[in-house]
Image (tube, rainbow, N blue to C red):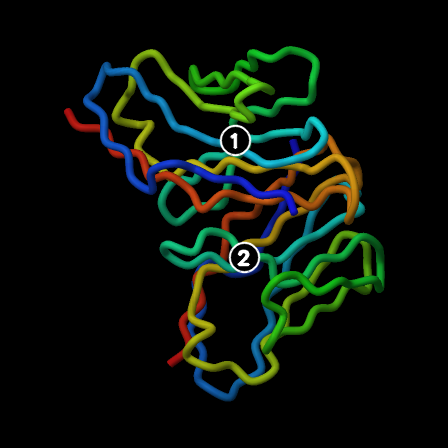
Amino acid sequence: DVKVTQSSRYLVKRTGEKVFLECVQDMDHENMFWYRQDPGLGLRLIYFSYDVKMKEKGDIPEGYSVSREKKERFSLILESASTNQTSMYLCASSRGLWDQPQHFGDGTRLSIL
Amino acid sequence: AQSVTQLGSHVSVSEGALVLLRCNYSSSVPPYLFWYVQYPNQGLQLLLKYTSAATLVKGINGFEAEFKKSETSFHLTKPSAHMSDAAEYFCAVSPNYGGSQGNLIFGKGTKLSVKP
């Protein structure tokens, strides 16, 4: 079974802090994704990566950056956290094919105070 | 552009009743389609997927979905609801052309409540 592991289930940070969310997958997947999930808005794609050191902006990249130095690890960085970034963050991975599903981690519920 | 519409942000059924969650997609070529379930404070779990082998797809936990090209629909059903089915359900489409392979377009989700 595919395992996608997010480093924290719950995280509390202060405004202005630099925040790192880590995600690791164990199935040698090419693609990795970061989403945020807010009530009524569904899943919104922040960034994705289809290869090591490659990244693409999703629908809402502002205020975020990402890093993929190794194939199995994809990090989301909040450069200067703000209260409107309080949300549930979901990481996913998939093989780079049309018919392949994405596999999700358990999510990180991030609160910015 | 491709899109996914889930009709009804909230659906409530009684235990033992039929579950029907609606999903319509827009795509100019037959897409690949997925249903996911999300339990509270968890990530999304794959329920089933349609990849053109058969129009009726069976998934986990007794769910199934039927691909209807003429209606551009992929509705999720379960004959008899159980209390443990209470969760949020997401329909997603892989467009099968253009853009990046592996990207999915998600609907906004339908929250299912099951009454005893």
Identify which amino acid the numbered label 2 is placed on: Arg
- Residue B46's disc is none
- How dense is the environment of label 2, judged by Cα within 10 Å: few (below 14), some, or many (20 and up)? many
Which residue is located at x 69 percent, y 22 percent?
B51
The location of residue B116, given as percent across then percent down, is 15, 24
Q: Which residue is mark 2?
A: A44
Vertical arrangement, residue B97 with respect to residue A40, above or below = above
Q: Which chain is home to disc 2? A: A
Tell which of A15 and B110 is nearer to you.
B110
Residue under the point 36% across and 45% down = B40
> A82 and B109: which one is in front?
B109
Residue at position x 56%, y 37% in the image: B92
**Does mark 1 fall on the same chain as mark 2?**
no
Chain to which the residue tagged by mark 1 belongs: B
Residue position for label 1: B35
Q: Amino acid at mark 1?
A: Trp
Q: Quadrant of residue A13?
A: bottom left
Residue at coordinates 63% horizontally, 22% vertically from top-left? B50
Q: Position of residue A108 (x, y in %)?
A: 49, 59
Vertical arrangement, residue B14 with respect to residue B110, above or below: above
Residue A112, placed above or below residue B77: below
